[in-house]
Image (cartoon, grey):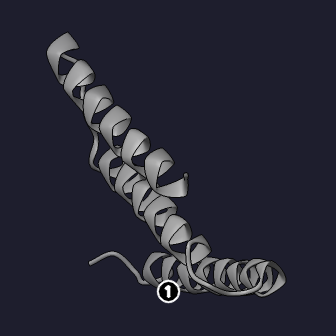
Amino acid sequence: MPTAIAVLATLSFIGWVIYRALRGKRIKAYMVSYGVAIITGVFTYGFFLSMNMPRMVKIVVSILLGIALIVIAAYLQRRTTSKPAA
């Protein structure tokens, strides 16, 4: 089931990009990277939930993994924005 959701999300994202391109609207780089990140996360989550592990372990590990990724992203963003412009 999670894999089917991931495939539908991928197809809908590709359709949305094509729709915006046909309408002549701008497709900004952050929109594409955000969409790719979401789709990658859904695929990873679907793969992780399909593994043979107890449900509580899956939930705890996914929460800890999410916290770690948020902390890493915040650290990298703060590090890149604190550099002075050249």
Residue 73 placement, left or right of 6: right
Q: Position of residue 23 (x, y in %)?
A: 21, 11
Residue that label 1 marks? 79
Q: Position of residue 86 (x, y in %)?
A: 26, 78
Outermost residue to the front: 52
Outermost residue to the right: 56
Q: Position of residue 36 (x, y in %)?
A: 35, 56
Q: Is residue 63 above or below residue 24?
A: below
Residue at position x 34%, y 45% in the image:
10
Quarter holding residue 83: bottom left
Q: Is residue 10 above or below residue 83?
A: above
Quarter holding residue 55: bottom right
Residue at position x 80%, y 84% in the image:
60
> Mark 1 packing: few (<14 Cα in 10 Å), some, or many (20+)?
few
Residue at position x 26%, y 22% in the image:
20
Residue at position x 25%, y 19% in the image:
19
Q: Position of residue 28 (x, y in %)?
A: 28, 41
| Foreground residue among 31 and 40 | 40
Q: Secondary structure at mark 1?
A: helix
Residue 41 placement, left or right of 64: left
Outermost residue to the top: 23
Q: Amino acid at mark 1?
A: Arg
